[in-house]
Image (cartoon, rainbow, N blue to C red):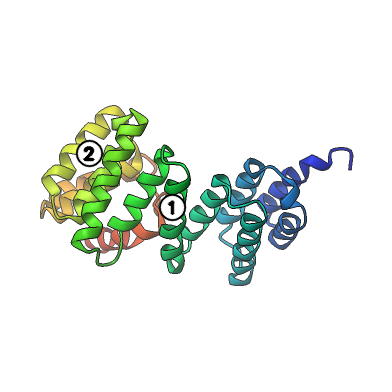
Amino acid sequence: AERPDQKMVLAGFLARRGSISEAIAMLAEFGAQADPGQIIPVVGSLIERQDASPGDRKRLKMVLLDLAEKKKRPVPLLIALAVFSTAQPELNGDAEKFYREIIERDTRYFPAYNNLAMLLALQPSPSKDQLEEALSLIDKAMQLSGQAAAFLDSRAVVYIARNETEKALKDLDAALADEVTPVRLFHRAWAYHRAGKEDEARDSLQEARKKGFAASLLSPPEQGAYLELKKKYE
């Protein structure tokens, strides 16, 4: 009551404790008065809730769309909508739309280039044009960020989708030399699998497990790849 500007802190707390409907209601009632940056953590906490019902998720989307319009579609809210849509496989088309709008509004926001590239590459049956665009988007993210190593893993995923596994493995070796992570090890297992190198794929998947890999670390569009490898090597 003494800090009315902090209502989003309470909404985030409610989301984390599992009071999902209450958190969404607070977001709907007070979000228009909050800074967009205060809304992002609340949305993130709500997205992470595996126990959110389809009705909760539908309500959250409507609230975010309403807030975006009220605030003249600021980039932070568009990011929240893109992240939310990416977490819902049936809304990937919406995520692509939001990332394209983010790039249009802020041409130097390099995470949007990376995330859009991943969405395009991880379509069930990406077209040649989509894969070409995905590769150019990753290259643009690298140019803008000045941190090539951070995006080598993403580019490797694009190369896997393009069936260029040798290029994927080269990027993954460089990314792993920079930092060993469970997801990068999983991507290496995926690349080996696509290259027909089953022993190496199995070893890399086991190494990923030892480093703490879990399917929850992957984006929803990558879940199909995980199921493919799990069936083959576990």
Front residue of 105 and 25: 105
Q: Is residue 24 left or right of residue 122?
A: right
Tell me if residue 155 can be seen.
yes
The residue type indicated by label 1 comes to Tyr
Q: Which residue is mark 1?
A: 99
User: How far apart are labels 2 and 1 at the CA level?
Assistant: 25 Å
What element does badge 1 sit on?
helix
Please determine whether, in this image, residue 133 is positioned above or below residue 143: below
The residue type indicated by label 2 comes to Leu
Percent across and percent down for residue 156 are 23, 45
Q: Which residue is mark 2?
A: 172
Please determine whether, in this image, residue 34 is positioned above or below residue 65: above
Indicate the quadrant containing the N terminus: top left, top right, bottom left or bottom right.
top right
Indicate the quadrant containing the C terminus: top left, top right, bottom left or bottom right.
bottom left
Percent across and percent down for residue 34 are 72, 45
Front residue of 124 and 186: 124
Image quarter of residue 123 = bottom left
Residue lying at 54% horizontally and 46% vertically, measured from the top left: 75
Q: Is residue 142 left or right of residue 95?
A: left
